[in-house]
Image (spheres, rainbow, N blue to C red):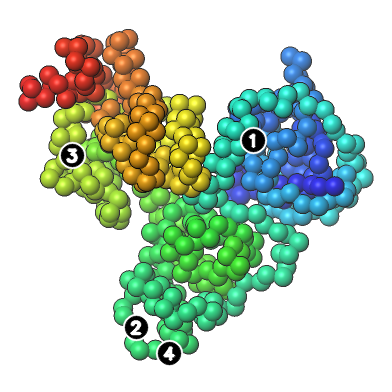
Amino acid sequence: MKGYQLKITIKGSSPPIWRRVIVPEKISFEDLDNVIEYIFGWTHDHLFSFVIPKERIYFNGPSEAGDEEAVQEGIDRWFYEKAKIIYTYDFGDDWEHTILVEKILDYDKRYPQVVKFKGPNMIEDCGGIWGFYDVIDQAEPFEMEKVNEYLKAHMKFSKFEGSTYPEDYGLPYSEKEMYEELRKYLKTMAGAGGEENFEDFGELEPEESLEEVFKNYKKDDLLEIARDANLPKPARFKKAELAQWLKNSLLESGQFRKVLTESTQEEVGFFQEAIEEKGIYIQAELVSVSPLLSFYCGLRDGEFLTVPKDVEEKFRKIYTGSFQRELERHWELSGYCKSAVYLYGVISLEDLAKIYRGYEHKKITAKELADIAARYPGEMTVKDGYLMEEELEEVDLYVRLLEDQEKLPYYLPMDKEDFLRYGEVECQEPDEHTLPMLEFFSEEMDQDMPHSLILYYAVLDSLQKNGEPEECASLAMEYCKETRKGRKIKLIKIIKNLQPYVRTWENRGFTDYEVEAMRTEKQDASRVLADSKKETDKDCKVVAFPGTKKIYPNDPCPCGSGKKYKYCCGRKKK
C-alpha cells in the first residue's frame, strides 16, 4: 500500500501556517476535505472546493445546487510527486490552502497522520486571512498528539475506487506527459523545493559552523566563493586557514546584509525554511545560482540544504524588524521594475511610478525606482529618465523602440499579482497556442525537455523583442545542428502561428490580437490606473489607445505585397 505526504499551507499566512500530513491512497476528495477541516480547526459550516490548477478542473463539495464532484472523485489520479492542488474553504472569507504532494511513500494505514505542523488552529468567520491576525490571540493551539489520536479513532477510510473522469479526460496522453515534464523542469528553474524525507529528518542535523562546511570544499572552491562575494583577495592561506578567513569575512554584518539585500524573496524564504526545519530538500540548480544559499549553507548529497548554527545565530541578530521591512520594500519595488522591463522594454520612471501608485495606492518617487534599478546591473539600467533593459541603452535603441510604441497604452492586468508575475523567471509558460513549438523541439528535433525549453524561451524572447519568425527558426535550427529545409519551413509556420499570442515590447506588453481588438472595437484598453482618473489627460503619460485607425509596423502592408508594412511602404516613407 502507499500513501501521500502532503504539506498543506494557508495562503497569505506569515509566518506560514501549515500541516504536514500523510493520507492513505484510494480516498475521495470528500475524505480529504474531512482531514483538512479537522487538522486546521474548520467546522464544516461552509462550502469547499478543490482545484487542479493546470487542468482547470474543479471538485466541489455537496451543496444545495447538487454539486458533489468531491464525493465521486478519488485523489490518486491527480496526486503525483510535486503536484499542487488548491483547496478553498468558505467562499466568503475565501480561505485558500495550497496542497503540495511532497512525495509518495509506503503506508499501510487507512487513517491519516500529522507528522509536523506550524501555527495554531484557524478561526471561523473572522474575515479571512487579514481578519484572522486581528484575533489570532483567540486561536486555539494545535495539539498534534491529540489530533492524531482522533484521526486514528474516527477517520479510518474504506478504499475508494470510483471516478467521474474518463482516463482521457482532457489532453492527449503525449501532451499530458509533456506538461508533467514541463512542470518538473519549470519548478527546478523557479526554485521549487524538493521532497523532504521526514523519516530520515532527525539524522541530518545542521553543522555547528560554516567553517565546518568549508572544510569539505576544495581550496579552489573557497577561492571562487571569495571572488564571487567580491571579498578582498585572500592571503596565501593554507586550506584550513582559508576556510576560517572566509567564514569570518562572510559573517561580518555588513557583508551578510549585502548578500541578503541582493537575494530574492524566494531565496530568503528557502533560507528561513531551512533554519526552521533544520534542513530542507531542494534542487541543487537553485543553490548554485544563489549566493545566499551557496555561500552560507551546507548541501549534502546534492539536495539536502542546512544552515550552520553560527550562520543562523548571526542571521537572527541582523534580520531585525526594520531590516526585514527594508528588504520587503526592496523586493516590492524590484518586482515592479522587472515586470515593467519584461513587458515594455522601456518605460519612463514617472509612468512606472504611476503604475505603482495605481496598484498599491502608496506614494513612490522616480528616484526610488532608479535606485532599485541600479542594484541590477546587467539586467536593467536607467538613462534620460527611462528604465530599460540594459541592451537597449546601446546606440540609443530605446529611442527607436519608443517611436515604434508610439501612443499605445501600457498593458496593465487588473490585478497587481498578475502584473508582478511578469517579473518572474520564464513567466510566459507554454499554453494551447505555444505548446506546438515545444512539442516540435521535443518530438521532431529530438531535444530533451531542458533543451526544448531553452529553445522555446529563446524563440519567445526574440519574438518579444520584434524578431522575425525566419530569424528565430534559423537560430533554433543552428542550435540543433539541423539542416533539413522541410523542418525549417514547418518551424517557421509554427512560430508564425504563435506570434500573435506573444506579449511584445513593440505593443507595450499587448499581443498582436489584443492590439487588433482595441483598434477595431475603438475601445479604451489602457486599464486606467486607479489614481489616473484624478489626473488630467495633459498630465498623464499613460495614454489611452487612439480611436483613429492607423497602420502599425507589423501590420500587412496595404499595397498588397504580403510583406509587413515596416519592410515595405513603411520603409520607403523613412
> What is the distance, in whole Å, between disc 3 and disc 1 at their CAs?
42 Å
Residue at x 40%, y 55% (from the top left corner): 326
> What is the distance, in whole Å, between disc 1 and disc 4 at their CAs?
53 Å
Residue at x 36%, y 69% (from the top left corner): 228
Residue at x 54%, y 41% (from the top left corner): 182
Residue under label 4, please give it: 238
Q: Which badge, 3 or 1, comes first in the chain's sequence?
A: 1
Q: Specify few, some or many for label 2: CA neighbours under 10 Å numbering under 14, 14-19, or 20 or more.
A: few
> What is the distance, in whole Å, between disc 1 and disc 2 at their CAs?
50 Å
> What is the distance, in whole Å, between disc 4 and disc 2 at their CAs?
11 Å
Q: In this view, does 554 lie to the left or right of 309?
A: left
Mark 4 and 2 residues: CB-CB less than 8 Å, in contact?
no
Q: Which badge, 1 or 2, comes first in the chain's sequence?
A: 1
Q: In which quarter of the image is the C terminus?
A: top left
> What is the distance, in whole Å, between disc 2 and disc 3 at their CAs?
42 Å
Q: Which badge, 4 or 3, comes first in the chain's sequence?
A: 4
Q: Which of marks 4 and 2 is in front?
A: 4
Where, by quadrant of the figure, is residue 341 drawn? top left
Which percent across, then down, holds residue 456?
A: 41, 39
Q: Residue 234 carries which label?
A: 2
Q: Nearer the viewer, mark 3 or mark 1?
A: 3
Which percent across, then down, holds residue 164?
A: 76, 23
Q: What's the amino acid at mark 1?
A: Ile
Q: What's the amino acid at mark 3?
A: Tyr
Which percent across, then down, holds residue 10?
A: 64, 42
Residue under label 1, please give it: 86
Q: Does dot 2 land on a helix, a strand or a loop?
A: loop
Which percent across, then down, holds residue 6?
A: 71, 47
Q: What's the amino acid at mark 2?
A: Pro
Q: What's the amino acid at mark 4?
A: Lys
Q: Which mark is residue 398?
A: 3
